[in-house]
Image (cartoon, rainbow, N blue to C red):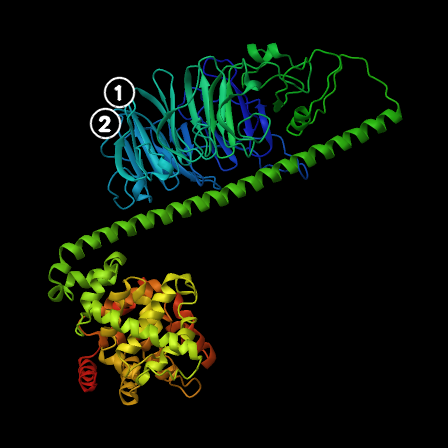
Amino acid sequence: MPFDGCGDDGAPVFLWVCGGGFVSTPILIQGHDVAARSRQPIVCVGNRAYIATQSGQLLRWNIYAESKDGPGSLSHAQFETLSLQHGRVSAVTGSRRNVVVVDDIGMVWSMGRDQDAFVQIPIKATRIVRVACGARFVIALSDHGTVLSWGDATDCLGRQPTSNKVDVVVNLPDNVVAIACGWAHACAVSAKGRLFVWGENRQGCLGTGDNNDRVLPVEVDLDNVTAVACGYQHTMCLTKSGKTFAWGCNMHGQCGDPSVSTALVMPHEVPMSRTVIDIACGAFHSALITTDGDLFMFGLNNGGQLGLGDYDLRRQPVRIDSMLEKNVHAVFCGGLTTIALTQNLIGFSCSDDHFSLAHIETGSGWDQLGVVSSPQPPVMYQEIDGVDDSSPVRVASAAEQISNVFRLDDTSTSGASEPIRVSSDDQRYRRELHRMTQVYREKLLKDTHRQAVQQWQANSVIMEADRERERQLHLSQLRAAAVEASVKTWMNDILRDFNKRRDGRKALDLLYKTGIPPRLRSIVWPRAISNSLLINTELFSVFSARAKRIHMEILAKGEQNGSAALAVGRENTIYYIEVDLQRTFPSLAFFRRGQPLHSELRNLLQTYCCYRPDVGYVQGMSYLAGGLLLYLDPYTAFSTFANLLTMPLLHSFVRMDSEAMSAHYAIHACLLQGLLPRLHAHLFSEEVAISPQLYILEWFMTLFSKRLNLITSARSWDLIFTLPAPHVTIHRTAVAILACVQDRLVGQPFDDCMNVLNNETKAISAHELMSAMSGIRVPPSIVTELDNLNNQIDR
């Protein structure tokens, strides 16, 4: 249906639109009777505009996605009428996916963006006068000044969530007069000019001076606020004195501060030399109207939504010169679109020279339905400044050429003038010129649209990256807070009486949830393992010096068998340490040749060879020593390492005690059969035949540090070192690792299973491993068998 334009007093109301990637200067739409007295007469939802008329109808118009006239062109602007089952529409708002309207008796109705029927929102005993929509929540203002909310975004409701129930927002005065919603935050203005905000504080959009979310409303430090508007992650308000303040994301200049390219967490005054009477926010752009009816825009302009004739963003308010002297009295912003209402029409271009400006301004020529009584009523006009329509010769500008795409085809003829005879050559020339011009228009339109879509997609990627970065920052803040709380508990409680409290409920909860804080491992690990060997710094220095002498002698002789004169027992295995260091934590630069930890690791292992010449160096020890050096100083790491290897289970493996090792293999197989029977049946089947010694030897020798990532490995060590029965914990850890990769093992052949056991276990997160371990219970009979096995081992 056509869209005519009368205000409440019978004077014409003209509707202008720009943006959407199609038009970067305002296009005039000859329109219907916009409900100028309504607080919410127009809203942009996706690629459509919804307009509440004075007669109580709701018109739907596809702003920039109608393509009926062939490639690259738009059809004439047609408005579809939507009606409520009962009552008339008095206000309309919406989000990306929904349209919400209020009827004349205060009832609220909702409709999906691609639907045609409204559903009533059950709000009892309250008359609603205004609504505002966020991404996943809605707030409504009643005629008594109270604010209600509903939706599934619990952090944005301004109250404690109550299962899909409409309820009153708390901490607000009873006389709220204005409301607004961003993507995930909300605002309310009281009759006394106080501004309240709540929701997610992305990019500081709440204006509270920080980035902390607010579940309940808090007051912003501003006085005499009369209006508020919200963008995606920015907020703007208007004060009684006509000043405008903005805060939140300013990446595209939408807050009007050219000196800041990131975010403003506190309200900042938008620099304006004139008094502002109205404000509006799109997703990433903003609009202001001054007392003299001028329109100012700033922010993102990738779809031409600023109406400046280009696609460049503006970081501070810029006047829209094409709207001068038109007396703009309202502006509405969508994602890529801006719609303005004016009361004057000055200097427009029209396909019918007989349709005079005086007729439009005075209202003459309008019939009782508000439709212009003209033989050629245009649907859209393109504003062309500086062109005199009365001149006999008119030069079409590029903007006017684009505007022709939006006009009705002129099929009428003027009977008042003498028919002009045109030669056949001229006719052919004009037809060819018309065809070429049309091709140019279509190509220009398609290119502009494509560029706008590409820019929008690029911005969407950037926004998604920003959201992910914010989410990760929020998670890291939560983790940091949990670590700080854990540090206090360890220092003030557990470590005060460590031996009694190391396996208490509080310690177990922390070990499984967060582990030992990394900064405390240098304290907890040595205390947990204890120094039963009574190693001191003097002893460490003596054996360290001896190890260096033997190392230098071996290097000087260059004998691969390490037959140095000073070497005793298995001290000659010092030679093999240097070879093995190249394979220890190869992804870490700390242990590479020339780095500090490389020499410290080599010295620790060589010192142990001299300290325990009966044991010497065994391949895999480097992972144990390297893992300790990541958290402990060289002396403490050596003392902890030497005492750790006295643990019966580890001692039996470094001494290659075949009888004890076979017993541990059998215990592991028994645990696997009882706890993971499906996996046990697969690994021990004739087709796969993977015995425990194929992976348990390496896992136990390195305490899993070779096959787990560093974070997960350290968390497993927290449990092994701290819990009273480390031999039981080691077996539980092995079964937990298999539980984490069970689905990737069952049904796979031998080679694939070995690849999972040797490589894919590094992908196991600490949370996964701890969750698996918390559910593993070792039967008492096996615990007894492990205790007996420990007592039989000679250390």
Element type where label 1 sits in the image: loop
Q: Quadrant where the N terminus lies?
A: top right
Q: Is residue 782 left or right of residue 248?
A: left
Residue occupied by mark 2:
173
Q: Is residue 151 visible?
A: yes
- Identify the residue shown where x is 51% and y is 41%: 459
Question: Residue 114 at x, y = what percent?
Answer: 49, 42
- Quadrant in which the C terminus appears: bottom left
Q: Earlier in the sequence, mark 1 or mark 2?
A: 2
Residue found at the far bottom of this picture: 659
Name the residue nearer the viewer: 250 or 107: 250
Image vertical order of residue 7 relative to residue 428, above or below? above
Q: Nearer the viewer, residue 278 or 705?
A: 705
Q: Residue 191 in the image: x percent, y percent?
A: 28, 21
Q: CA distance from mark 1 to mark 2?
A: 10 Å
Q: Amino acid at mark 2?
A: Pro
Number of the label disc, if any, that sits on residue 161? none
User: Considering depth in this image, is 320 or 644 the residue closer to the camera?
Assistant: 644
**Quadrant hosting residue 123:** top left
- Can you tell which quarter of the image residue 600 is in? bottom left
406, above or below 565, in the image: above
From what the image shows, is residue 74 above or below residue 366?
below
- Dot 1 corresponds to which residue? 192
Q: Secondary structure at mark 2?
A: loop
Marks counted in the figure total: 2
Front one among 133 and 250: 250
